[in-house]
Amino acid sequence: MASRVSLKTKGKATGKGSKGSDERSITQAVKEWTNWTMKKVKVVTHYGFIPLIIIIGMNSEPKPQLSQLLSPV
């Protein structure tokens, strides 16, 4: 069986530490998941924003050529 790591808390012990540690582990899991998700969103946004703008520009009327869309004039 796998052993479970428990965190020691400061203050008075209530004798039923499983509820507090479960809440803490859920909170920690949510924080880790949120951090992981935000890192992925940052990468996708960083590399996907300009290509998205180009695709939207290519599908608009009148239909420009790629060279016209990328030129600064």
Image: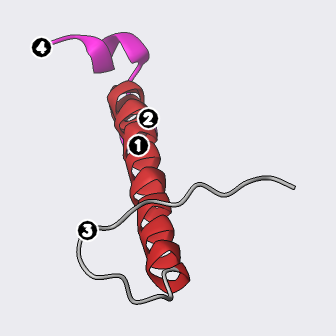
For disc 3, the marked residue is: 10
Amino acid type for the residue under numbered disc 2: Val
Is label 2 in a helix, a strand or a loop? helix
Q: Mark 2 points at which residue?
A: 44
Q: To which residue does mark 4 refer? A: 73
Q: Does the magenta stretch include residue 19?
A: no
Mark 3 → mark 4, Cα distance in angstroms: 65 Å
User: What type is the residue that disc 1 sits on?
Assistant: Val
Among the two numbered marks 4 and 1 on one chain, the one whose residue lies closer to the N terminus: 1
Question: How many numbered marks does the figure carry?
Answer: 4
Which residue, given by chain and number where applicable, does mark 1 sit on? Answer: 41
Query: Which callout, 3 or 4, points at the residue further toward the start of the chain?
Result: 3
Separation (CA) of disc 2 from disc 3: 41 Å
Q: Between tags 3 and 4, which lies in front?
A: 3
Q: Magenta stretch mostly in which secondary structure?
A: loop
Quarter placement of the C terminus: top left
Q: Position of residue 10 (x, y in %)?
A: 25, 68
The local secondary structure at tag 4 comes to loop
Q: Which mark's residue is nearer the viewer, 2 or 3? A: 3
Label 4 close to label 1 by CB (< 8 Å): no
Q: State the residue in front, 2 or 48.
A: 2
Q: Are marks 2 and 1 in contact (CB under 8 Å)?
A: yes
Query: Amino acid type of disc 3?
Result: Lys
Question: Residue 28 location, x and y as percent?
Answer: 43, 60
